[in-house]
Image: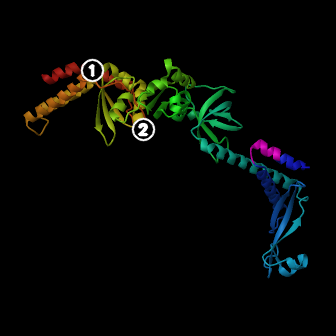
């Protein structure tokens, strides 16, 4: 019959999700630590757990040598042969049993602490091994408690933390509530919960689309990029690998059922689904959706800078609230986007024309006038020929114009005063 201690070890191993051998090793280490404290000797001590009796045996190990230099760890060949006969040879080791029933209360307390520490370390290693390969996966969790703004949740039999910076400002939680979050990382050395969750990471949005849209799950439609300002707005760039499948329509679903399910999960966050294109101009045009773009010009290909011209009434829509729309579009496409209204662009070209007329050029007056006429004609042609606005693009990157509501007001003021400025120049 199995001894009670071994039964306890196996039950504890099952509860903690670790191997029984790990706990046995912890017990052996604990008794060894306590023995060294008690005996205060330089002997080479060793412990061994006896699964039959449930006892931990303690030994002092001595090495057989020809000439003894350290009596605590060595024994002469002659003495060893007197104890064990002719079988004893040089370089063999002999175990000398020592008592463990004299260790006392303090040694037992030390052993207890060592066992707890070893078991905790084994648990943390198991958690790291289990979840380090699942970073980016969406998990269901239950809200447990709040700690200084951070949210501690139950993730299966483990605890995880949802830091304040990873929480959407549009959301609030109550203990016992079920939430879905993406695993952002696993910390091996943290004192508290090791698993870090996020509700603001774009990976959560991508995983939710994979769960809701069969075409994304089976690879027919691909997500080429996603950016978010959690709680407010997000943009997702999608691409279809089959010509007969509309990527945007597949993500929206019939009457918007698919995207509405994701919006409900994200507590009302607005989602713009745009079609990805390998044409940078078309991609930027799509990414600025729902605003309609008149003309897009690449200003600096190396620095990835574009100038976008929109109708005067579309300017505020293209910029978005506090520059949110253009900022997300810039992150999605990887291009820096400079948005101007038609009137603003027209005044800019007329100002260049006026400067050239005043002789602000090293060339002849005729050349200066011709150059100005060409610029004005190009700007007028761009305004008269609207660009195609049938798409709405994609993908994450850096850089954006910090455009806020004050810039919109300035643009409006410029448009109102433009008539008088032009008349003054002509005079």
- Residue that appears at 25% across and 27% down: 345
Between 64 and 254, the one lying in front of the other is 254
Along the line of sight, the residue nearer the viewer: 129 or 307: 129
Residue identifier under label 1:
415
* Residue 381 percent location from the top left of the image: 21, 25
Quarter of the figure with residue 243:
top left
Give how far across and how far down residue 341 sits, in percent. Answer: 29, 24
Q: Give the side of residue 424 with respect to residue 309, left or right.
A: left
Q: Is residue 186 visible?
A: no
As for residue 16 lying within the magenta part, the answer is: yes
Looking at the image, residue 291 lies above or below residue 39: above
**Which secondary structure, mark 2?**
loop
On whether residue 394 falls in the magenta region, the answer is: no
Question: Which sits earlier in the primary sequence, circle 2 or circle 1?
Answer: 2
The answer to whether 137 is drawn above or below residue 317 in the figure is: below
Q: Disc 2 designates what residue?
A: 397
- Please give the range of residues in magenta: 10-18
């Amino acid at each position: 019959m199995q001894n009670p201690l071994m039964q306890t070890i196996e039950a504890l191993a099952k509860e903690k999700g670790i191997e029984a051998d790990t706990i046995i090793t912890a017990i052996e280490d604990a008794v060894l630590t306590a023995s060294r404290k008690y005996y205060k000797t330089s002997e080479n001590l060793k412990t061994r757990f006896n699964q039959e009796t449930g006892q931990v045996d303690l030994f002092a190990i001595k090495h057989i040598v020809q000439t003894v230099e350290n009596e605590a760890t060595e024994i002469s060949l002659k003495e060893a042969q007197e104890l064990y006969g002719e079988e004893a040879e040089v370089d063999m080791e002999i175990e000398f049993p020592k008592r463990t029933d004299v260790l006392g209360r303090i040694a037992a307390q030390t052993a207890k602490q060592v066992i707890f520490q070893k078991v905790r370390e084994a648990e943390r290693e198991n958690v790291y091994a289990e979840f380090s390969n699942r970073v980016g996966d969406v998990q269901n969790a239950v809200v447990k408690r709040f700690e200084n703004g951070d949210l501690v949740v139950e993730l299966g039999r483990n605890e995880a933390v949802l830091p304040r910076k990873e929480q959407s400002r549009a959301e609030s939680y109550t203990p016992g509530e079920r939430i879905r979050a993406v695993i952002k990382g696993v910390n091996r050395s943290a004192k508290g919960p090791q698993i870090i969750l996020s509700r603001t990471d774009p990976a959560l949005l991508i995983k939710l689309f994979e769960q809701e849209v069969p075409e994304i799950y089976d690879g027919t439609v691909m997500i080429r990029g996603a950016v978010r300002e959690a709680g407010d707005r997000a943009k997702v760039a999608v691409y279809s690998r089959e010509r007969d499948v509309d990527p945007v329509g597949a993500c929206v679903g019939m009457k918007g059922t698919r995207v509405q399910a994701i919006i409900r999960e994200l507590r009302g966050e607005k989602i713009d689904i745009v079609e990805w294109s390998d044409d940078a101009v078309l991609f930027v045009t799509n990414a600025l959706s729902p605003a309609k773009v008149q003309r897009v010009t690449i200003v600096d290909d190396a620095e990835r800078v574009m100038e976008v011209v929109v109708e005067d009434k579309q300017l505020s829509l293209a910029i978005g609230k506090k520059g949110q729309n253009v900022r997300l579009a810039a992150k999605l496409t990887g291009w820096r986007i400079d948005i101007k209204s038609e009137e603003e662009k027209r005044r800019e070209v007329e100002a260049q024309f006026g400067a050239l007329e005043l002789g602000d050029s090293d060339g002849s007056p005729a050349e200066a006038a011709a150059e100005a006429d060409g610029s004005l004609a190009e700007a007028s042609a761009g305004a008269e020929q609207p660009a195609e606005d049938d798409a709405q693009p994609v993908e994450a990157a850096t850089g954006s114009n910090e455009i806020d509501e004050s810039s919109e007001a300035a643009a409006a003021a410029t448009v109102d005063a433009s008539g008088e400025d032009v008349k003054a120049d002509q005079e």
